[in-house]
Image (cartoon, rainbow, N blue to C red):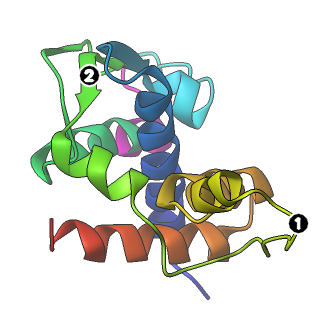
Amino acid sequence: MGDLHIDDFYKDAARILLVLYQYFPRPYTVYVEDISGPDEPDEYGLHSDRHQACFSTMVWLADAGLLRYVDVINREAIDQAVLTHKALTLLTTRSEIRFQPQEESMPASVADEHASHVHQLRFAVKSGASFTIRRIMQHLLTEAKKH
């Protein structure tokens, strides 16, 4: 049986990177609820474990050098977040992992874009398959160490 918290980490990390890529180079406020879904704090004002894990993923990605942000908003968001140079170059480079077969009739420019890490990551997240998301994120995190 898999470690569900690790699958959630990979899914959250993938979504965070894709959101910031979509807004790059503009700083963007990333809300936990937009990544992991709605959450209602308990009677003491504490968020669920799932919410806290998603927020921690945001902070971890910053610590790993993949994004930077200006401030946190009540453990509900990271404010003025942007991908780092490392993350941008990683996402835009050609991926060795392919989940979606390329059509032979594709123009070269489209085929090149489809071979990028960001395209493979989008495909994995859209598929919703934990195995696919885990595999591309493991690959990206391994590659990040080389950048």
Based on the displayed image, in which of its 4 quarters is residue 99 positioned? bottom right
Report whether 21 appears left or right of 1: left
Camera sees residue 44: no
According to the image, label 2 marks what residue?
Answer: 81
Q: Where is 25 relative to 141, above or below?
A: above
Callout 1: helix, strand or loop? loop
Q: What residue type is labelled 2?
A: Ala
Residue under the image location 50 percent in, 39 percent down:
18
Quarter of the N terminus within the rendering: bottom right
Q: Which amino acid does label 1 sit on?
A: Ser
Position of residue 20 measured from the top left corner of the image (x, y, whole percent): 41, 30
Q: Is residue 107 magenta?
A: no
Task: Point out which mark residue 105 bears.
Answer: 1
Residue lying farthest bottom?
Answer: 1
Position of residue 63 measured from the top left corner of the image (x, y, whole percent): 11, 47
Task: Point out which mark residue 47 bears.
Answer: none
Binning the other alpha carbons within 10 Å of mark 1 as few (below 14), some (14 to 19) or many (20 upward) gives few
Report whether 77 appears left or right of 137: left
Residue under the image location 40 percent in, 21 percent down:
30
Report, in whole angstroms, how far the alpha carbon at label 1 lies from the one at label 2.
38 Å
Disc nearer the start of the sequence (1/2):
2
Foreground residue among 8 and 83:
83
Callout 2: helix, strand or loop? strand
Residue under the image location 52 percent in, 60 percent down:
116
Position of residue 16 measured from the top left corner of the image (x, y, whole percent): 44, 38
Camera sees residue 18: yes
Task: Tell how many labels.
Answer: 2
Foreground residue among 87 and 33:
87
Question: Start and end of the magenta stretch?
Answer: 45-53
Report whether 140 appears left or right of 119: left
Binning the other alpha carbons within 10 Å of mark 2 as few (below 14), some (14 to 19) or many (20 upward) gives many
